[in-house]
Image (cartoon, rainbow, N blue to C red):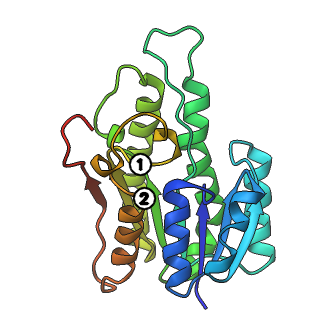
């Protein structure tokens, strides 16, 4: 049985990806800050829950140690966990440190801790869930924009390194996705990308031939303004 590791798996995009992989026969190590969210994944298949806040460096190290010690090196690593904290480019205090840690540093560090083991899998796949703001700017989310631009650059670097080591790397850049953050906003859910759309992209990538890998996938909303 192949193994997948999905961060931020309790809700939204991460949950949808976890369900899709479980239905495809993967054993899924799912990571979230809330155990109750992970318990809801149990009916879908072989779930290994790991409760942790990956904003904390010790939690990242503990997760990596657990993976290596329990022989759970993933065939598929999905770096989905992240945090949206708005500010402007001139805000004091700035949310830059928090956004960088949540949306870039944790991804880079967890992947680095597992990288040599991923190489040894011979056909591992890493997905980085970036954002349309990895290519665009949003003035009311300046630090988040900066962090996601950094994640986009990291994805390009990891893609090039992965090609040398037979590890596939794909960055997914969605526009607005209907998750819990949109509930009560009054926005029509049908205007936004569904988490299941992104999960389907992951499954499609995994079904490509060994010779094919997309470096980036950009997903836009049909509705203007989103």
Q: Is residue 221 above or below residue 50?
A: above
Relative horizontal placement of residue 112, taking residue 194 as reference (left or right) = right
Identify the image quadrant of the N terminus: bottom right
Classify mark 1: helix, strand or loop: loop
Q: Position of residue 13 (x, y in %)?
A: 48, 57
Q: How many marks?
A: 2
Residue visible at 58% across and 59% down in the picture: 111
Between residue 75 and residue 45, name the one nearer to us.
Answer: 45
- Determine crowd level at label 1: few under 14, some 14-19, many 20+ residues with C-alpha closer than 10 A: many
x%, y% of residue 179?
48, 48
Whole-percent x, y for residue 174 in the image: 34, 50
Left or right: where does residue 46 sit relative to residue 154? right
Circle number at residue 134: none
Quarter of the image where one finds residue 65: bottom right
In this figure, which residue is indicated by the disc labeled 2?
A: 195
- Point out the tag, 1 or 2, that comes first from the N-terminus: 1
Residue name at image x 58 percent, y 81 percent: 120
What residue does disc 1 label? Answer: 178
Residue at the image point whose x is 28% and y is 47% from the top: 191
- Element type where label 2 sits in the image: helix
């Amino acid at each position: 049985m192949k193994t997948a590791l999905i961060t931020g798996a309790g809700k939204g995009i991460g949950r949808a990806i976890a369900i899709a992989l479980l239905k495809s026969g993967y054993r899924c190590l799912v990571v979230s800050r809330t155990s109750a969210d992970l318990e809801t994944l149990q009916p879908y298949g072989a779930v290994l829950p790991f409760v942790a806040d990956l904003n904390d460096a010790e939690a990242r190290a503990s997760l990596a140690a657990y993976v290596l010690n329990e022989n759970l090196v993933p065939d598929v690593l999905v770096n989905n966990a992240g945090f949206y904290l708005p500010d402007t480019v001139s805000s004091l205090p700035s949310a830059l440190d928090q956004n960088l840690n949540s949306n870039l540093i944790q991804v880079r560090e967890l992947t680095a801790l597992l990288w040599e083991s991923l190489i040894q899998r011979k056909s591992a796949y890493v997905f980085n869930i970036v954002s349309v703001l990895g290519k665009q700017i949003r003035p009311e989310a300046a630090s988040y924009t900066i962090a996601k631009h950094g994640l986009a650059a990291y994805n390009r670097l990891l893609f090039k390194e992965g090609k040398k080591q037979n590890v596939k790397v794909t960055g997914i850049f969605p526009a607005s996705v209907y998750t819990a953050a949109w509930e009560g906003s009054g926005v029509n859910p049908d205007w936004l990308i569904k988490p299941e759309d992104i999960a389907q992209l992951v499954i499609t990538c995994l079904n490509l031939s060994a010779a094919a890998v997309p470096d980036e996938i950009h997903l836009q909303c049909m509705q203007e303004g989103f």
